[in-house]
Image (spheres, helix red, strand yellow):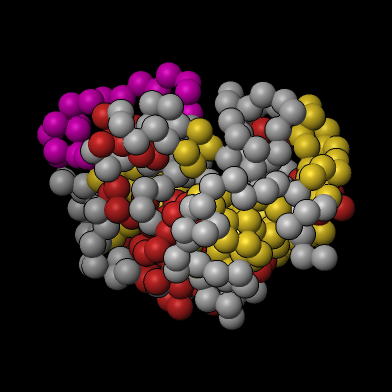
Amino acid sequence: MQGKMKKVMLTGAKQFEIQEVDIPQIQASDEVLVKVKAVGICGSDLEAWRGHHPHVTFPVVPGHEFVGEVVEVGAAVTGIKAGDRVVKEPIEYCGHCYACTHGRPNVCKDLKVYGFALDGGHLEYFVSKADKVFKFPAAIDWKYAAMLEPYTIAAQVNERTGILTGDVVLVHGLGPAGIAIADWAKVNGATVIATDMVPKRLEMGALFGLDYVFDASKIDVKKKALEITGGEGPNVIVDTTGVPALTQEALELVSPAGRIAAIAFNFNPTPLVTGLINAKEISYVGSRLQTYQFQKVIDNLDKYIENIKKMVTHVFPYTEINKAFELAASRDPEVCKVVVTYDE
């Protein structure tokens, strides 16, 4: 396909510039050309927009939660054709470092993430290796399909913590990441306790059917969690907030043989009584991005799609991307997920 397209450049902190450039061309037989349809705005995108992201050098095309329609395929591509709807895996990795060769390419020593170290999804067309895009059902609206990537993060957290049917899981923070993690755990058989302090998010937790939803500004969550679990404590605690005090509290609260996952990137020193890790044989894990989760999420989409529809609260055309980012960053209690569309 020849011609021009629009792409959105983040040229500096809170500075967008819509440029007209040539449509990229397929260069290899295993590549596909995709027309972007929708891009979700993530908290990490907002950090880049604010100029605070450590892996962003301006200018860059932001966006890592992007979906679109295949318009051309290379000669060697099988299983994907023009007209297919696909979601892009937004990471590139070396394939030969320790992490890559041990099934953990999401933490490759040379990891590059689209929208940060690499140009991302806020443009009209992109070229990708065919094995880095995943088909999803045509019945899924583009704005909801933009939630596929966030749900891979949820699947990754659930896998890293080994959540089992019957486990009691406490999730701190019901932003888009936290509520997706809670939803995945609930649908897969866990009892879920969730906390936040924003009324809309608390309401969303209730709409998702989470078992217990508490306003952490009004309720002693630790006391409640112990009551719910008969004094044993939750089996899994997931912190999406990055509040340092919650880390030590999690060690005290989690059950013996429990698991704790830190999702938010907090680089501030956090004192811990590490003896609790030994005494209860706690597994304390990090979780970043995803590894091999896209197909799993797509295959189980029918379990989550109705809740995904509740998460997307605001949609903007790319011509109003400034408004979209400003709203996403506003902490407006009515905002959950903001999506930008390129479907013109």
Q: Is residue 191 left or right of residue 138?
A: left
Q: Is residue 149 magenta?
A: no
**Height in image: 38 above or below 242?**
below
**Height in image: 229 above or below 160?**
below
**Height in image: 76 above or below 20?**
below
Q: Is residue 271 magenta?
A: yes
Is 218 or 102 nearer to us in this picture? 102
Task: Give the total of numbered labels.
Answer: 0
Q: Is residue 16 visible?
A: yes
Q: Residue at x 31, y 40 (%)?
A: 104
Q: Residue at x 50, y 33 (%)?
A: 112
Is 323 or 93 nearer to us in this picture? 93
Q: Residue at x 67, y 48 (%)?
A: 25
Question: In the rendered view of the protein, which quadrant contains the C terminus?
Answer: bottom right
Q: Is residue 178 left or right of residue 50?
A: left
Whole-percent x and y of residue 94? 39, 32
Whole-percent x and y of residue 194? 44, 57
Whole-percent x and y of residue 82? 61, 69
Q: Residue at x 70, y 33 (%)?
A: 60
Question: In the rendered view of the protein, which quadrant contains the N terminus?
Answer: bottom right
Query: Residues in magenta?
Result: 266-286
Q: Is residue 196 visible?
A: no
Residue at the far bottom in the pictured view: 139
Residue at the far front in the pictured view: 75
